Amino acid sequence: MTLDTDKIDDAVLALLHLGLHDGARAWKGFDWDAMDRLFEKGFIANPANRAKSVVFTEEGLRRSRELFEAMFTK
C-alpha cells in the first residue's frame, strides 16, 4: 500500500490545532516523520527539541486552522 504523505501531513496539521495553546504552540504527540515533513514544509518550528510542544509558523497556524475547519466542523 502506498501512503499519500501529503494527506497525512494535512491531517496531522489539522489535529495539531486541537492542542493549540499560548497563541501559536501545540502539543506534539504525533508521528515524528510527519512532524519532520511539516517542519520541512515550513509549517512548524523544528520539533526535534526537549519541549513537549512545537511552535507554528505564521503560515502553519493559518493552514492548520483552515484544515481543521474543513475537516472537523459542520
Image: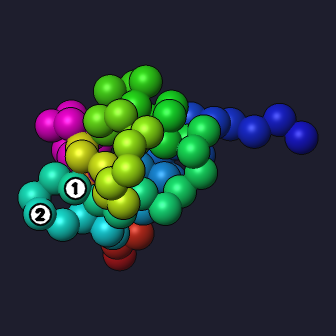
Q: Nearer the viewer, residue 1 or 24?
A: 24
Amino acid marked by disc 2? Asp
Tell me the distance, in whole angstroms, between the alpha carbons under discs 1 and 2: 6 Å
Residue at 59% in and 51% down: 31
Residue at 53% in and 57% down: 30
The residue lying furthest to the left in this view is: 23
Residue 11 on the magenta segment: no
Alpha-carbon neighbours of circle 2 within 10 Å: few (<14), some, or many (≥20)?
few
Residue at 35% in and 34% down: 46
Q: Position of residue 21 (x, y in %)?
A: 18, 66
For label 2, the residue is 22
For label 1, the residue is 25
Q: Is residue 54 left or right of residue 6?
A: left
- The answer to which image quadrant residue 32 occupies is top right
Q: Position of residue 13 (x, y in %)?
A: 41, 50
Q: Can see residue 14?
A: no
* Figure check: 71 above or below 61: below
Which region shows up in magenta? 57-64
* Tag 2 secondary structure: loop
* Figure check: 61 above or below 27: above
Q: Magenta region's main secondary structure?
A: helix
Q: Position of residue 33 (x, y in %)?
A: 60, 39
Residue at 38% in and 43% down: 49
- The answer to which image quadrant residue 73 occupies is bottom left
Q: Nearer the viewer, residue 69 or 6?
A: 6
* Figure check: 57 above or below 31: above
Q: Are marks 1 and 2 in contact (CB under 8 Å)?
A: yes
Amino acid marked by disc 1? Arg
The residue lying furthest to the front in this view is: 50
